[in-house]
Amino acid sequence: MASGQRGLGWFDRLGVRLVLMLGVALLPLGLIAISQTYRMIEEVNARTRSALIGETLDAAASERQLIAGTLTTARALATLSGTLTEDLELCSQMMRALVSETPAVAFAGVAAMDGEVICGSQGVGETLAGTEGFERFAETGSEYVNSVAKGRITGLPVVVVREPILENGEVVGFLAISVLHSALDVEATLFSRSPPRDILTFNARGEVLTSDVGLDTATERLPANRALELLATPEPKFFRGTDASGEERIYTVAPLLHDSAYIMAVWPPERPGIALANASTAIAFPLLMWLASLGVAYFAVHTLVIRYIRDLRRRIRAFSSTRRLMSEPNFRGMPSEMREVTEAFLSMTEQIVRDEADLQNSLHEKDVLLKEVYHRVKNNLQLIASITNMQIRKSKSPETRFILRRLQDRVMGLAAIHRSLYQATALSEVSADRLLKDIADHLSVSVISSRSDIQFDVELEPVTLYPDQAVPLALLLTEAMTNAMKYIGRPDDGGPWIKLQFRRLTDGVVELRVSNSTGTPLKDAHNESTGLGGQLMAAFTMQLGATLQSDTSDGAYVVSARFQPSDFSQAEDAA
């Protein structure tokens, strides 16, 4: 019979196993879905990045054109600076004309290498030495663009473009053009959705040129973990980062002018259209679909199979414990296979109930017949004992009467066994203590009652035996009691006695012990011996599988037999 032990707990359940198997089967599809989703997300993110960069460049197109035009003008004037410096008044007129024709330009002029403005739209004769832009240009001698909050000559926030003036390959001065910050502002209406938090421009050195929000607070909106000079590359960039205050931002960077100026847009992460998906998004959707498939599969298995199996399990348990049938199951909606299994179980249980009822009736009839057999055998043995008793009364020879009485005792011992069997609840079990008491009472009445001075003690512990052991035990007791009555003597310090003991020892062993006093033989005891009693005791001991011992000590003759009762559970298993 298969054991009902659980091996792996919840894994033993049918629904869990089916869901796991289906999960493994759907896993390759899930991996393919993750790969496709991740690829699609990458494409969407790339388009989103490109769209934001393009939107930034489109919005700053006018700013880019203004700075590019200013640089072009500066480079063109720088090539003519040798001619212009020959006539400084003409040079100043040209610079004033440039400022008047270009509203975005606040100042234009030519300065020598010592910083003095030799011609310009204004401030001729003033010096630019000591300014940060002049010092940087003096170090490099190359084109340089920077932003100042207050120009030395104009006193306005401007972006200054410095173009070197060369003479015979040497830098002899520079042309400076100042562009107003207000001319570089980007209008919010140029963006398709909400505008960025700020649009900044910076040069190749990482110096901020302009800021739509304010140049003095521009550093607060720059990425905290990236240097601007590292972002000054020809390729556009898109990345997430945190500003100086720790808030998350999205940054787009694109070249405004090659190797000169760059534009950066600072976007809020919640702006519509830039909520970019990542790897977790690529996994989340297929995972949700996978879990949903498992849920649908479990629901389907539970609806079509598991609930009917559980109902069938309840019916099996109820039938196995009470042998009662539950109410008729509801076959509506049940799959045909489960309906066939349930119907087969119901048919089987009905057949088992009928078979068990028939078997119970048959066993009852057999018990009645077997008890009747034991009863009749007991009556027949008692009849034989009565006939023997009649023969004893008619016999005149003491030896004959002694032999017949011994025979009668043996017959009555067998009768006592059969009486115990038909009176017992279980026909295969005999209460050994009751059986031995009945035999002892019979023997004491037939022999000891004639001698009132013989003391007879009985100590019996309850022990249950099979008939195979009860029969030789009863006959052994009969022979042992007969010998005790035959060889009993009167001790010097008291009256004669006989003692019967039946008790349990250690390890389940039981002992039958019959002892009698020794001394002066009683006159009515028959002392002749034929040896038959000893032979019978040896035979009965062998049938019991016992060890027989007899000895005389301390004024008593003792006969004891020890044996191991048969195990009822082993016998039942064998049956």
Image (tube, grey):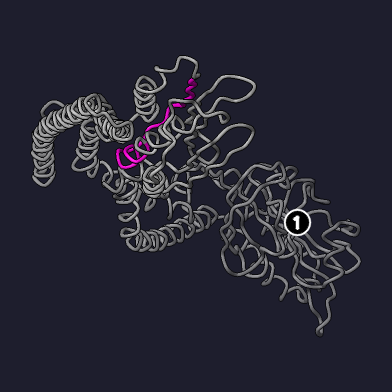
Q: In this picture, is 16 found above or below 475?
A: below
What type is the residue that disc 1 sits on?
Ser
Residue 157 pos. (x, y %): 74, 47
The one nearer the camera, 118 or 149, is: 149
Q: Quadrant of residue 208?
A: bottom right
Q: Looking at the image, how many numbered discs can be counted on the residues?
A: 1
The one nearer the camera, 2 or 43, is: 2
Q: Give the range drawn in magenta.
A: 456-473
Q: In which quarter of the image is residue 262?
A: bottom right
- Mark 1: few, some, or many residues within 10 Å (few <14, many ≥20)? many
The one nearer the camera, 91 or 416, is: 416
Give the farthest residue toward the bottom: 168
Q: Is 410 placed left or right of 197 in the picture?
A: left
Residue 134 pos. (x, y %): 85, 62
Who's the residue at 24% across and 41% down the image?
Answer: 306
The one nearer the camera, 70 or 137, is: 137
Residue 342 pos. (x, y %): 13, 40
Q: Is 279 placed left or right of 63 in the picture?
A: left
Residue 79 pos. (x, y %): 71, 76
Residue 143 within the magenta-colored segment of the rendering: no
Who's the residue at 62% across and 37% down the image?
Answer: 553
Q: Is 321 placed left or right of 165 in the picture?
A: left
As helix, strand or loop, the secondary structure at mark 1 comes to loop
Q: Mark 1 points at which residue?
A: 121
Residue 467 within the magenta-colored segment of the rendering: yes
